Amino acid sequence: MSDKRLRILVIGSGGREHAIAWKLAQSPTVDVVHVAPGNGGTEASADNVVNVNISVDDFTELVAHAKKHGLNLAVVGPESPLVAGVKEFFQAANIPCFGPDKDAARMEGSKAFSKDFMQRHGIPTAAFRSFSDYDQAREYLDSVEHDVVIKADGLAAGKGVIIPKTKEEAHDALKQIMVTRDFGSAGSQVVIEEFLEGEELSVLSFSDGYTIRSLPPAQDHKRVFDGDEGPNTGGMGCYAPTRVASKELIAQIDRDLVQPTIDGMRREWMPFVGILFTGVMLTKNGPRVLEYNVRGGDPETQTLLPLLSDDTDLAKVMLACTRHCLDAVEIKVLPQFSATVVACAEGYPGAYAKNRTIALDRPPSANTHIFHAGTIRDGNQIVSMGGRVIAATATADTLEEAVTQAYKGIDTIKFKGMHFRKDIAHRAFKRKADALDTETNGMTYASAGVSIDAGNDLVKRIKPFVKATARPGADADLGGFGGTFDLSKAGYHKDSPILIGATDGVGSKLKIADATNIHNTVGIDLVAMNVNDLVVQGARPLLFLDYFGCSILDVDIATAFVEGVTQGCILAECALVGGETSEMPGLYNGTEYDAVGAAVGAVNRASGQKILPDMESMVVGDVLLGLTSSGVHSNGFSLVRRIIEKKHLTFSDSAPWNAETSIGEALLTPTRIYVVPLLKTIERDLVKGMSHITGGGLLENVPRMLPEHLAAEIDVSTWNRPGVFKWLQESGKVSNEEMSRTFNNGIGMVLVVSNVAAGEVKRVLEENGETVFNIGKLVERDDEGCILRNLDSWSTS
């Protein structure tokens, strides 16, 4: 950066502009900050801050003032001058301007334009339709059954978004926007979109048109009353950072939402320079963009700027954006929390009172800041002129303390009719209370969003439908590891092999692959999950097919994934004979994808082989052998990711259970493929049954190979549990039973063998690279199909 001194013009009069001027004035490179027109508090920010009585929409006068006073950087706060093209006026005068040009500002100026942009670039957002004809919009509204959000297309001071609770309210909102024009010309077009459920975040990102630097995610409070009741406002308060956003989620938002937006805008010849505000909803299907603002949010800006470190030079950051070299400056954020409470005028957000005298006492601490918005100075007095009048922001080491100090700041402000919300950050505090409850009771697979019981219930409910498809050769029954088809019973030669089919996916382990950009190992997982389900029925895998579904086909990712599939097929000695790649814009986030596989194997009837399990041959006293797993394999990852988030770790951090690798690399160790060693024991008729330990763990999977009168008694102290399972249990306070129902705990395959054959089976498997433990025996069944002994050894291991 050159040593040129900066003389800055900040355009705007709100709390956002007060905070910007306050932070810019601290820069050692800044001589003076002019604020046009400013408010009743901006000049008090510092000795080098001066108010200028020029309207934000008088572009000619703004430029003339900048020239007259040698101002060499313009910073635009509000959206309306940006949408109207103020940047072009400063460009014509060769004065750098921090803020997007008129074309780029359409991302906020027209919601229909921004939604179409997201659709073109595959940026995840809610389904929507745009209308400029009221009757067509009304007919569409009548045709949909899902909840909707109705948005005025143009600028509406943050109030043009209506979330109706009933169809009648939706029609009233539509009439307000398009017929009575409550929001003026902003209602000439309307966007009706699907209502998304989840937590809402505000992400503010500096951009130079290429590089992004996002600030910590904040959470705004739009509704006017406590408990998120009442009409929408411009914002009643805010806090940051949000507890709901893990490091990995923040990285995902940047990677899948913000960066593709900046890249897409540049490719459409409207590069974005300034602060991009991305409203994000964290849905159960991942983060989705709600809207864009082409400037810092209000009150998000007041909340976030105090979190910048003293050595972060905001003026340098803004200048670097205008020079397209944002990567040349550093932005440091303090490891603290910030909270803002906004005090509003009587009547707001409706018609509100003005000219109320404001009494101000000294803020309670140096970390509490009073940012003016709708105020003016009248002689020696400060009086109210806007709806959102003034705000208190505080920073502290904890969110609780930051909120407490912000409310102490509000206590120093007095004016007639003043009102404010008294529950800022209430959602964060509720989440903390829920987390404490989880701490007490322990985390479960269900609490991570996966219900094994629901899966089992689904199987029961669909069994009759599946049974109806039975035909000669297939009984169409569910519940085993794979499906069988007897070719001889279907009219083929009597010695034709029995075919076994299996299908499975990798699950949410793919989230980790996406986050780490390691994709070959999950290709091996996909094969393993299928071929292991074939071999437990005595089948030799013959062929494999894969399906790869995505929203944006990244050829490098897909290639790496299929390479992994081929590696898995080689290990299983089967052929990859085909597959399907499906590109479906908008269905997945960014480069995320899903994958499903199907495998077919055969049991050679002519050589005397039989389908397993051979339940009739099983007796009390039969030995249970356990083959070690390579790690977590491909089940339980929803819970794994929740535990990692709870511990505030990222996948790039060193694995707590193995310092020689990262968490992501360790967890992506592929599922072990047991096919070749097991086939050697099957061909010699040494095994009575096998169970692949997948979703449901030992408790759910082992009974699937047993007759109803027998149970498996397993001593969990007979093998040493790998460190990853010890860490997961301790970090998530997961109960022993939940561990048993969710993870393999170090045993990926369980065999039933006779007491006589146990030694030989163990020898054959170990000669072929497996580690084998004698883990238990079969006993008479009283109730449960799998009994785990010595579980207390897990608590002390």
Image (cartoon, grey):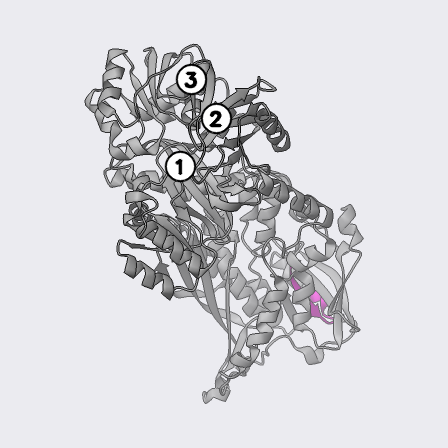
Q: Is residue 753 magenta?
A: yes
- Choose between 15 and 31: the one closer to the eye: 15
Q: Amino acid at mark 1?
A: Phe
Q: Quadrant of residue 9?
A: top left
Q: Are marks 2 and 1 in contact (CB under 8 Å)?
A: no
Looking at the image, residue 46 lies above or below residue 645: above
Residue annotated with mark 3: 378
CA separation in Å, label 1 and label 3: 34 Å
Residue 692 seen in the current view: no
Viewer-nearest of discs 2 and 1 = 2
Q: Earlier in the sequence, mark 1 or mark 3?
A: 1
Residue 356 numbered mark, or none: 2
* Residue 511 image position (x, y, % from top left): 49, 50
Q: Quadrant of residue 256?
A: top left
* Residue 222 image position (x, y, % from top left): 48, 41
**Residue at disc 1, secondary structure:** strand
Q: Residue shown at 35%/42% (left/top)?
A: 260
Q: Which residues are magenta?
A: 748-760
